[in-house]
Image (cartoon, coloured by chain):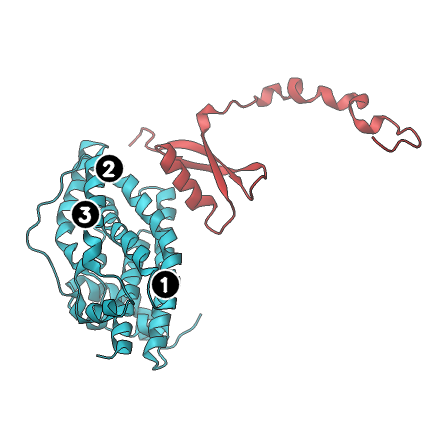
Amino acid sequence: MTQQEALFKYILRLGDNALIHSHRLSEWCSNAPFLEEDLALTNLALDMIGRAQALLQYAGNVEGKGRTEDTLAYRRSERQYYNNLLVELPNTDFAYTIARLLFISAFEKEYYAALQKSADSTLAAIAAKTLKEIKYHFAHAHDWTIRLGMGTEESHQRIQNAVNDWWMYTSELFEMDETDDQLVKDGMVPDLKALYPAWLQTITDTLKAASLNMPVTGYMQTGSRKGIHTEHLGHLLSEMQYLQRAYPDAEW
Amino acid sequence: MAHNNQLDSWEVFMQARPGANYIHQGSVHASDRKMALQNARDTYSRRGEGTSIWVVPTNEIAASNPDDSDMFFDPANDKIYRLPTFYTMPEGAKQI
């Protein structure tokens, strides 16, 4: 694999994570518990879609075959997507949405801070802009985790269930394949394994502050680095890509 | 549910640039100060309108009663000597 091929595949992973998580959050539009939270969640979705746009556009440039961010977002099938499984799973309920946002934003907080030092100046610039947004995403998820954990008996149970059920999808965030190995060696991207202790500490502290139990680590899900996904991604894409599939090259 | 299940109401004030007055923007619902600030940010400053936000619990605001408006606001209007335009500028005065 050339450095160009490795970089292309790697940036797709970053872009896909932002795009698919954004889509899940956008599903809350008009469905959130109250108006202000509706605005907050869709606001996070808009941050992520901006990040996805910047990353997929850069991926298209790196690939050099004339694909734009739109072609990459709307004309790939699920096996060509590299987002982590966690972001594609259904929202389930508000607690599950918040628990996912907590796990992901705590990871991205460490990740994008490290990516700012990338030898690739475009990635470093995207990272610097993204980090400001992520800090807000984390604050939102962190505060809600504590409110739900310290709220009623029902809210406590719901956020605990969400944390427990999502746990098996968290080790994939730190999985590294040959693309990572090659790009880490060249100083282009962070070593994901090195980010794990800080992430675990953040999660441990947050759950403790919310009087929630740390989940028990058992079987861990994997597959997305190879483009193998849950059954949910296909359904998500069929909705997200409908217009471009039904009316190719439609503009508005 | 018959009872009120809305969160508490907070008034939002925002400063457009450092040193400027805080201007009332509207209100948000929230259960605590942090949530009120975050909701105010998401509701009123998503496109870079502000540099700083205050939130104040709505029920902490003391407001004048519309029934008292005669007593509060009328007296000033019919005494023209209360207005600077009542006084003529002395000719040649430069430092007024």
Farthest top residue in view? B71
Whole-number angstrom distance, CA of label 3 to CA of label 1: 24 Å
Q: For marks 1 and 2, give the one nearer the viewer.
A: 1
Mark 1 vs mark 2: tell me if same chain. yes
Colour given to chain B in the rendered image: red
The quarter of the displayed image where residue A15 is located = bottom left
Label 1 – label 2 distance at C-alpha:
35 Å
The residue closer to the viewer here, B35 or B72, is B35
Q: Position of residue B78 (x, y in %)?
A: 77, 22
Q: Quadrant of the C terminus of chain B?
A: top right
Residue type, numbered disc 1 = Ala
Which dot marks residue A148?
2
Q: Nearer the viewer, residue A112 or B70?
A: A112
Q: Furthest-bottom residue in view?
A: A65
Task: Give the labeled residue for mark 3.
Answer: A200
Disc 3 secondary structure class: helix
Name the residue beneath numbered marker 1. Answer: A124
Residue A90 visible in this rendered orientation of the protein: no
The disc, 1 or 2, on the residue closer to the chain's N-terminal end is 1
The chain that hosts pointer 2 is A
